[in-house]
Image (cartoon, rainbow, N blue to C red):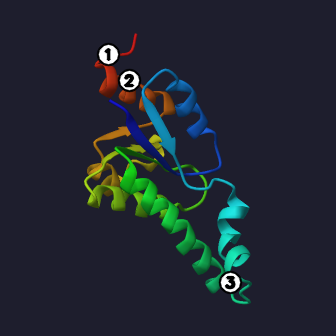
Amino acid sequence: MTLHIYLSGEIHTDWREQIIAGAKGLDVSFNSPVTDHAASDDCGVAILGDEPDNFWHDNKGAKINAIRTRKGIQDADIVVVRFGDKYKQWNAAFDAGFASALGKSLIVLHGPDHQHPLKEVDAAALAVAERPDQVVEILRYVLRGTLPA
């Protein structure tokens, strides 16, 4: 069984790389949003033309990014959404809600300080992890039925 995993959310740490490295040898494939912050912010104006108003600049980029995000989540078996310590990650909350609405298996990843603010998001998840290695162990268990050593 191959699992298709969509890694969504925070882009300022290496959590994705930790999961991908830890999942070596497992029958998984990974997809994610564009994690180059500047490219993600500016894709709309780079492709469709400049906007003098920041709202429309951001709107163009958000909609183009949504094409990739929606496709990635729709194709995924499991969606992992990471909420980091910096910035308000409204896009991560949207992705978690979208994945849940589609009936996708949702794993939420965040530290204990986000437990209360994310209680509704956590309630929609099938697992809430604090560390990337816990996500890897969930994947290993789902695929192989084995517990951590």
Residue in front for this viewpoint, 19 or 24: 24
Alpha-carbon span between mark 3 and mark 1: 50 Å
Judge whether 103 appears above or below 137 on screen: below
The Cα–Cα distance between marks 2 and 3, rounded to whole angstroms, is: 44 Å
Residue 72 shows in this picture? yes
Q: Which mark is residue 54?
A: 3
Do the residues bearing badges 2 and 1 touch, measured as CB atoms within 8 Å?
A: yes
Residue type pointed to by label 3: Asn
Q: Check disc 3 and report its element: helix, strand or loop.
A: helix
Residue under the point 61% across and 54% down: 86
If the image is split into quadrants, where does the N terminus sit?
Answer: top left
Mark 2 residue crowding within 10 angstroms, few (<14) / some (14–19) / many (20+): many
Q: Amino acid at mark 2?
A: Arg
Is there any visible trace of residue 109 in the rendered image? no
Where is residue 14, by image quadrant? top right
- Reading the image, the residue beneath label 2 is 140
The quarter of the rendered structure image containing the C terminus is top left
Q: Give the spatial CA distance, label 2 vs label 1.
A: 7 Å
**Nearer the observer, 26 or 14:** 26
33 with respect to 73 (left or right): right
Q: Sequence-wise, which precedes: disc 3 or disc 1?
A: 3
Which residue is tagged 1?
146
In percent of width and height, residue 20 lies at: 54, 32
In the rendered structure, which amino acid carries the disc numbered 1? Thr
Left-right relation of 1 to 21: left
Q: Residue furthest top?
A: 149
